[in-house]
Amino acid sequence: QQIPNHISPVKKIQLYDYTESNVNKFAADLKTELSRLPPKNIDEFMNIFQTKLNEACKLDKPKISKRTPIANPWITGGIIASITKKHELHEHWLQAKKEKVPTATL
């Protein structure tokens, strides 16, 4: 029995990370660049815009997830951010465990 297309899991590919800090960096960099060298036409503007967007928000490696809003509507951006933070903290803990801790002598 086949699963209908509208139910089968679809992978979501994320190329950009539009966190508040990334968007603020993008806006500040774009404003600085446009103030320094105003574009002569729309093509120049779009080139500057895309360059600054890629510098601030484009991921080095695309994220692929099966957690789409349709498949998992309860997985919010906040939950994903918490999961990511938990993984980072776990990695730090694993690294700390590997380091030799000097023992205190009394």
Image (cartoon, helix red, strand yellow):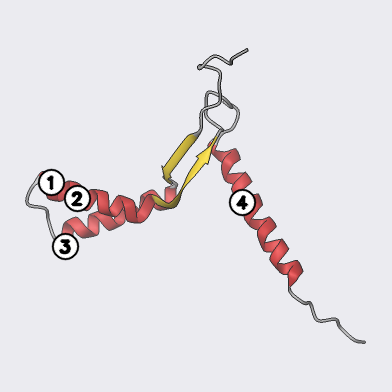
> Which residue corresponds to mark 4?
85
Which residue is outermost to the bottom? Answer: 106
Give the alpha-carbon distance from disc 2 to disc 4, as whole Å: 34 Å
Residue 9: % across, % down: 55, 26
**Nearer the camera: disc 4 or disc 1:** 1
Q: Residue at x 61, y 51 (%)?
A: 85
- Looking at the image, tell me whether mark 3 or mark 1 is earlier in sequence order: 3
Mark 4, secondary structure of its residue = helix
Q: CA distance from mark 3 to mark 1?
A: 17 Å
Pinpoint residue 35: horizontal percent, then vertical percent. 17, 58
Q: Nearer the viewer, mark 3 or mark 1?
A: 1
- The kind of secondary structure element at disc 1 is helix
Asked if the residue under mark 4 is in contact with the one under mark 2, i.e. CB atoms within 8 Å, the reply is no
Which amino acid type corresponds to the residue marked 4 in the rendered image? Lys
What is the quadrant of residue 34 in the picture? bottom left
- Res. 47 mark: 2
Give the residue at the far right of this rendering: 106
Disc nearer the start of the sequence (4/1): 1
Task: Give the mark nearer the N terminus: 3 vs 4.
Answer: 3
> Do the numbered discs 2 and 1 sit on residues whose CB atoms are within 8 Å?
yes
Residue indicated by mark 3: 36
Q: Secondary structure at mark 2?
A: helix
- Foreground: disc 3 or disc 4: 4
Label 3, label 2: how far apart the Cα atoms are: 15 Å
> What is the spatial separation of the Cα atoms under label 3 and label 4, in whole angstroms?
37 Å
Estimate the spatial distance between the alpha carbons at disc 2 and disc 1, rounded to whole Å: 6 Å
Give x and y (percent) for residue 20. 43, 48
Q: Which residue is mark 1?
A: 43
Q: Is residue 53 left or right of residue 92?
A: left
